[in-house]
Every structure is written in C-alpha cells, then in structure tokens.
Amino acid sequence: MPPAKTKKATFVLDAELLTSLSKAVEQGAASSADALVDRALRRELTHVDRRTRAARWKEAGLDPLFRNDVRDVEEAFTEADAETARSLE
C-alpha cells in the first residue's frame, strides 16, 4: 500500500494535554506525537461515524416505509433462512 499523503495542520490545544502527549510519547505509547495524535483522531472519528450511523438507523426505524421494506425482505427470505438453519443442524 502506498504511504498515506500527509498535510501539516496547526491546532491550539490545552497546555496540560500537550504535556501529557509528550509524556505518553516518552513512555513509548507511540513513535511520535504526530503518530499518537493521528491514532487518537482516527479512533475518535470512527466513534463519530458509528454514532452517526446508529442515529440514522434509529431514525429509519421510525419510518413506516422503511419498516414495511424490512418486513417484506424478511418475509421474502423466511424459507431461505429456515433452509439454512436446517442445514446447520
């Protein structure tokens, strides 16, 4: 896989947070502050994405048309699901 493209960015962070970041890197939590911030930001953005998708699914669950579509799909696959279950016994 080719190396990721990077771009320099500037952020203003709490001084205590920066001190903790430096200590964590010194203790071997990551190879550099950039690497630790990258990892933490990716993790947080993953959580944001999951929360966003969960909210969308919750909203969809309140939509009568979506619920009808789900019911129709479940009914269409009832026999196939039963056949699969029998084959696993």
Image (cartoon, rainbow, N blue to C red):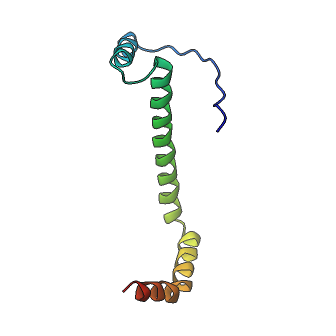
Q: Residue 65: where, in percent of width, then height? A: 59, 72
Q: Quadrant of the N terminus?
A: top right
| Residue sitting nearer the eye, 28 or 53 | 28
* Vertical relation: 66 (above or below) 4: below
Residue 89 place in picture, x, y as percent? 36, 86
Q: How many marks?
A: 0
> Measuring 64% from the left and 31% from the top, which residue is drawn there?
3
Q: Residue 35 at x, y = what percent?
A: 49, 24
Residue 72 figure quarter: bottom right
Looking at the image, which residue is at 45% across and 42% down? 47
Q: Residue at x 60, y 18 (%)?
A: 9
Lateral position of residue 15 relative to residue 57, left or right: left
In which image quadrant can residue 10 be found?
top right
Front residue (pair 32, 37): 32
| 31, 39: nearer the viewer | 31
* Residue furthest front as drawn: 1
Who's the residue at 46% across and 84% down the image?
A: 84
Left or right of 89, for residue 37: right
* Image position, residue 20 (x, y; %): 34, 16
